[in-house]
Image: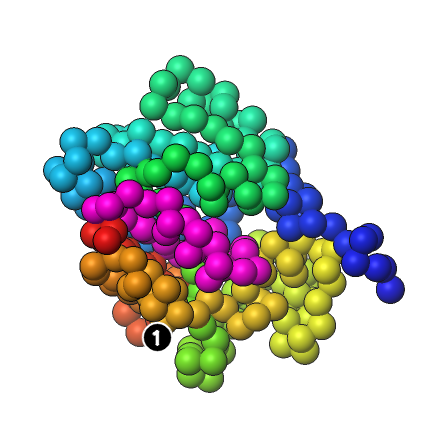
Amino acid sequence: MSSILDQPSMGDLQQCGHGAGHNYAKGSPHILHHSIRDRLVQRIHQMVGDVMNRNGRCRVLEVGAGHGCFTDHLLAAGAEVEVTEMSAPSAEFLRHRFRHNRKVVVVHDPDGDATRAGDPVDAVVCISVLHHIPDYLGTTGKLAGRVAPGGAFLSFQDPLWYPRRSALSMALDRGSYLCWRLVQGEFRRGLSTRIRRISGTYDEANPSDMVEYHVVRNGVDEEAIRSCLAASFSAVDVERYWSTQSCVLQAMGERFFPASSFGILARGRI
């Protein structure tokens, strides 16, 4: 068995899982599906608009921006954006993509430290980010600490806390994932990953296990995040919804299946 010193860091795993040529859209429901993406874009414009009406500007810290799919929407809403990425190839992609836009600053943050200290911002945005972070509550608190009075915190596309979900909810979620893997021609890989997750046996050197860190500790506790943010913001709203990779099962699940994912918007930094 490898020692702790031999185990890759979370930054190493993120870079391995999101290296050069990585397709962020594949398997990302908030990018794949119009219904989820439109909901998120609406929250972005609502948040930025509220801050700009109050302050006349909106400085945003976007943590884990990927390839900037939603950075575009932050800019369109009128924000100035500092984007961070643990993956060096993704950070380089972002620098190239926004090289002519003076409202974007790109930071390569391999250790996840640069996001937690720095100048005040008017909003923090974490899209499909918190479930990758082992200490997501501690990180949420530190990020909230960077938000200036009157500002906001938006997180979106994280899996609900498993212990509060029903057996039906978990079965539909896992079954939908395996169906999607089958269509992708990766059923064996998906089944192997699912067996490890069900048995609680994880490979700390395998990005399939550790990049999606929520599988190690039962999802993301949305109520704990709500409580954490409620201490610093005047209003905190949690939005629960169904989310899966398959387009067909997404459309069906929105009508008939219980929620599997959530977003959270905190407003009015005290």
The residue lying at 56 percent from left, 26 percent from top is: 92
Q: Categorize mark 1 by other alpha carbons within 10 Å: few (<14), some (14-19), many (20+).
A: some
**Outermost residue, top side:** 100
Question: Is 107 placed left or right of 153 in the picture?
Answer: right
Reply above or below: 141 against 164.
above
Figure quadrant of residue 51 = top left
Please tell me how many numbered marks the rendered image carries.
1
Q: Is residue 179 magenta?
A: no
In this view of the protein, can residue 83 be seen by the observer? yes
Instruction: Pick whichever, 38 or 11, lies toward us.
Output: 11
Reply above or below: 165 against 224.
below
Quarter placement of the N terminus: bottom right
Question: In the rendering, at what x and y percent does residue 91 appear?
Answer: 54, 31
Q: Is residue 130 magenta?
A: yes
Instruction: Pick whichever, 99 or 259, lies toward us.
Output: 99
> Label 1's element?
loop
Q: Which residues are magenta?
A: 129-157
Question: Is 19 placed left or right of 260 in the picture?
Answer: right
The residue lying at 20 percent from left, 59 percent from top is: 234
Instruction: Pick whichever, 116 or 239, lies toward us.
Output: 116
Q: Amino acid at mark 1?
A: Pro
The residue lying at 32 percent from left, 50 percent from top is: 153
**Outermost residue, bottom side:** 167
Question: In the rendering, at what x and y percent does residue 183 appear?
Answer: 55, 58
Residue annotated with mark 1:
258
Question: In the rendering, at what x and y percent does residue 143 appear?
Answer: 41, 49
Reply above or below: 174 against 205.
below
Instruction: Pick whichever, 249 or 144, lies toward us.
Output: 144
The residue lying at 38 percent from left, 39 percent from top is: 61
**Outermost residue, right side:** 1
Figure quadrant of residue 111 = top right
Question: In the rendering, at what x and y percent does residue 89 appear?
Answer: 60, 31
